[in-house]
Image: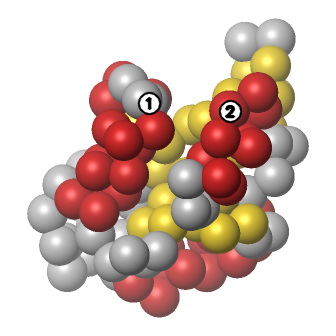
Amino acid sequence: MTVYIDPPAWPGHGRMWSHLISDVSYEELHAFAERLGVPRRAFERDHYDIPAQRYADAVRAGAVEVSSREVVRLLHAAGLRRPKGRTQPRGSRSS
């Protein structure tokens, strides 16, 4: 199981955020997030939004640090990318 996280570089709601993704399945991603104690409401289309203060927790739990560009590349390569406005990715592997 491999999940990935980009640096907390995305501003929102007075914080900086990271994106937590899987390149295998949403089930894998949801399971990892649950073990980390991340609420399901933090899931947005194809990733979890992780606040900067939880970044180190995610890495300690096994998330692999990658660039934001790599997050997008991995999602596309796995067929798991869900752009805004699309409810299911092409070749969906379930959500």
Q: Quadrant of residue 9?
A: top right
Q: Nearer the viewer, residue 19 or 82?
A: 19
Q: What color scheme is it?
A: secondary structure
Against 57, residue 19 (above or below) is: below
Query: Residue at the spot x=70%, y=76% of the render?
Result: 70
Q: Nearer the viewer, residue 45 or 33?
A: 33
Q: Position of residue 13 (x, y in %)?
A: 72, 12
Pointers 1 and 2 in contact (CB under 8 A)?
A: yes
Q: Is residue 42 above or below residue 72?
A: above
- Whole-angstrom CA distance, mark 1 to mark 2, is 9 Å
Label 2, secondary structure: give it: helix
Quarter-of-image position of residue 15:
top right
Q: Position of residue 68 (x, y in %)?
A: 75, 63
Category of crowding for the residue at label 1, using alpha-carbon neighbours closer than 10 angstroms: few (below 14), some (14–19), many (at least 20): some
Residue 65 screen position, x and y as percent: 73, 66
Three-letter residue code for mark 1: Val
Looking at the figure, which quarter contains the C terminus? bottom left
Residue beneath disc 1: 38
Residue at the (47%, 74%) spot, across then down = 2
Q: Residue furthest left?
A: 94
Q: Residue at left 38%, top 75%?
A: 1
Q: What residue is rendered at 44% in x and 30% in y?
A: 38
Q: Is residue 74 visible?
A: yes
Name the amino acid, label 2: Arg
- Left or right, residue 89 beside residue 74: left
In the rendered image, the vertical position of residue 91 relative to residue 62, given as above or below: below
**Residue 39 at x, y percent in the picture:** 38, 25
Q: Which residue is mark 2?
A: 54
- Classify 10 Å Cα crowding around label 2: few (below 14), some (14-19), many (20 and above): some
Q: Which mark is residue 80?
A: none
